[in-house]
Image (tube, grey):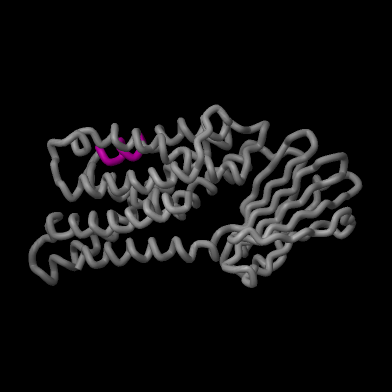
Amino acid sequence: MRQILIIGMLFFLAGSQVRADEMRPAYLEVRETAKDTFEVVLKVPAAGPNKRQPLYARFPDDCKILTPANVTYTGTAFVERSTITRKGGLAGTEISIEGLTKTSTDALVRVQNLAGNSQTYRLSPSTPSMLVTAAPSSTQIAKTYTVLGIQHILEGFDHLLFVLCLMLVAGINRKLFITITGFTVAHSITLALSTLGLVTIPLPPVEAVIALSIVFLATEILRGNRTGLTYRYPVAVSMSFGLLHGFGFAAVLGEIGLPEEEVATSLLFFNVGVEIGQLLFIAVLLVLAGIVGVLWKKVARRPLAPALWQPATAYAVGIIATYWTIERIASF
């Protein structure tokens, strides 16, 4: 029963990745290129060339359009580029995403002024607008990037499956949290190096190796060799692969961008958000495992032994990760 539940959840996650395009957040970038002149780029997720979400950027009424929107379709999104102007700039005004209240998606908004100061907000159906400030506070940046970190890890199914495998290898004990924290520390290093432009690696090979890292852990779980290096030193394994996963996280921040005046703060709190997201995922799994264990014991009148469900879980994870590996290598 327990293994069926876990396998079903895993295949649901895999299938959800296919449908994720419809749930990806929209992205609006407003960058001041000259005094009181702004380049606007709006990316709206799409499920096809004729399936654009009805999302549109709205600015103050006294804004003037210098260049009408030029719309292109990239295969996954509609991209609108335009130029606007407003006397006095946009500080103190409100920007909104029209149509957001009628969807189940979010929108990332990044505004950068001529001095290089930028602010990033995540708008949602309940809060479809934001107030542009001259310079965002450290508190606002910390909050925004913490939420972005949490949301990214909870939407990153490959990262979640990797964490699940780490749970099965490390066990439910103090070693698990040390292992997960080691993973966070490692990907924080490469995330910072990549985001700051000190190390650059093409993303497609990184994504393929990330999927391959899950296959490796699933194989180790199936082998069940508890005297091997993986089981004896799970922290070393998590940190080694964590270096790779950091490059994957960097791709997200590459799209969102970092406020130039608060790079350290935004990086720190994005990582804090990732760690919180991982711990939330672990907590949910532990609660579900406890519930299923109690139900199994009542029905079968005996505890649910790991030998009954760990191999099935490892097979399911391995199959999904193998599919991802092949798919990602084919996209090179």
Between 100 and 230, the one nearer to me in the picture: 230
Q: Is residue 61 left or right of residue 168?
A: right
Q: Is residue 216 magenta?
A: no
Where residue 292 sits: x, y (%)? 22, 64
Q: How many marks?
A: 0
Q: Is residue 278 left or right of residue 50?
A: left
Between 3 and 49, the one nearer to me in the picture: 49
Q: Is residue 123 visible?
A: no
The quadrant holding residue 60 is: bottom right
The quadrant holding residue 80 is: bottom right
Where residue 4 sits: x, y (%)? 23, 67
Q: Is residue 161 visible?
A: yes
Where residue 56 sits: x, y (%)? 72, 63
Residue at image coords 50%, 43%: 203
Main SS of the magenta part reads helix
The magenta region covers: 175-182
Residue at image coords 80%, 42%: 32
Compared to residue 32, the image places residue 290 above or below, namely below
